[in-house]
Image (spheres, coloured by chain):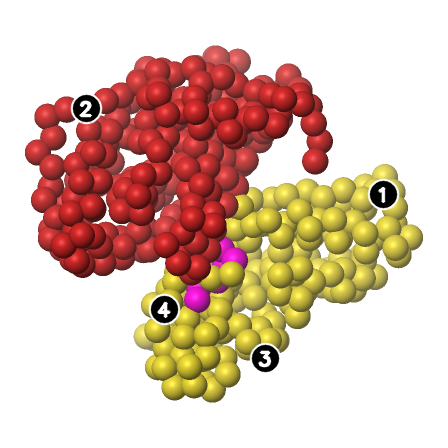
Amino acid sequence: MPETRSKDAIKQYAIRLGDDALVLGHRLSEWCSNGPFLEEDLALTNVALDFIGRARMFYSYAAELAADGSTEDTYAYTRDCRDFRNLLINELPRGDFAFSMARQYLVDVYNLAYMEALRRSTDSSLAAIAEKAVKESRYHLRRSRDWMLRLGDGTVESHGRLQRAVDELWGYTPELFAVDALEQELADAGIAVDAASLRPAWEQSVTATLAEATLQRPAGGWEVSGGRRGIHTESLGHMLSELQFMQRAYPGLQW
Amino acid sequence: MAATACIPLLPVEEHERRQRRANSALQPLWDLLDAVVDPEIPVVSLWQLGVLQDIALEDGVVVVTITPTYSGCPAMTVMAEDVQRALADAGYPHSRIVTKLSPAWSTSWMADDAREKLRAYGIAPPGENEAAPVHCPRCGSGRVRTVSQFGSTACKALYQCGDCAELFDYFKPI
């Protein structure tokens, strides 16, 4: 890969990973003061902070590569819906607690494996961010997996809600493992993660947890994708209108 | 010879960090920054926490290298400001903070005296790894239960002691 091409490709890739983290982090932050009980409220917002911090690291690196005066805030606050490249599962509305925890579990298993692989990236900045993220993702997964078991193997009500959540989320999971031309090019260069290679281990972990939580593994047969191309669900625009409100109303405003 | 757990080895990056301080020509600056503490755990200094990585002087500008504990830790901004304020108050108005991500911060860098300070402050210090047993910082009991994997901050989990009923934060090993 010629160096300028590679720089631009890495920038785009870093923005994708930043978008995943920012959008999920924002969804988690919506639980602030709405958690089912105080300790859980704190946990959700602490996990949100980890993701927002992760977004800042990826965006800052992208801005460094862009070297055009962009900052982390440029990417978070001034891009429109169609410019976001996050995986769709991250942008779905938080739903009830069961839905948020089911989403969290499905992406935590993915994120942990993803960051473990990204640690071996030949790009030292991406590898350094992943090194930090891995440690945090371990705790995220430990907690969300625990909630899968508690809710799934809990009451009739909690079991029903969690099963519905898993069913609703299932069609968004194949997108996690899709690899487009940009990621393939970077993966071949040892820079990006080949997401498709993570699928068998993810399937195995998730299937085992669903069984332990006495949940049915959804049959599948439907899937939605488009996030990496900027094609989103109707939810992202609404979310961004809140997230970006201040900078849209008062461009360049400093805290 | 079989490996034993009797003598805990210092992680190599922590050894290097201590060497950087020991061999630094800027001893007064290191000593000065010993007064800067974690804003959320004000009994532990940034040095003891492992956050303060290096100090250099470049063209009259003090360059302080720190490493973040957690990606989203809101205390990092305050730590950076506190470092710059401490330097300015001591007659170094020109300073710059550099954030270094790698090697990723680890609780294994925390010095023994810092662990003891945490315990006295009511926070159970981090164990060697995730499987290490947790003890109540008040009564020392090992009969504890996890209340939440995340406590008052991202770096801590909330526990409760089964003997003295104390609710306490556990500094999670990472």
Badge 2 and badge 3 in a common chain: no
Relative height, residue A146 to residue B145 (above, below): above
Residue count near mark 3 (Cα–Cα under 10 Å), binned few <14, some 14–19, many ≥20: some
Place of residue B65 in the rendered image (x, y in percent of width and height, measured from the top left): 68, 48
Label placed on residue A93: none
At a point 76% along the width and 42% down the height, the residue shown is: B96
In this figure, which residue is indicated by the disc labeled 2?
A: A223
Question: A2 or B46: nearer the eye?
Answer: B46
Q: Which of marks 3 and 1 is in front?
A: 3
Q: Distance between the residues labelled 2 and 4?
A: 38 Å
In this figure, which residue is indicated by the disc labeled 1?
A: B94
Question: Which amino acid is tagged 2?
Answer: Glu
In the image, the segment drawn in magenta is B153-158
Q: Which of marks 2 and 3 is in front?
A: 2
In this figure, which residue is indicated by the disc labeled 3?
A: B120
Question: A219 or A191: nearer the eye?
Answer: A219
B34 falls in the magenta region = no
Q: The numbered mark 2 sits on a residue in which chain?
A: A
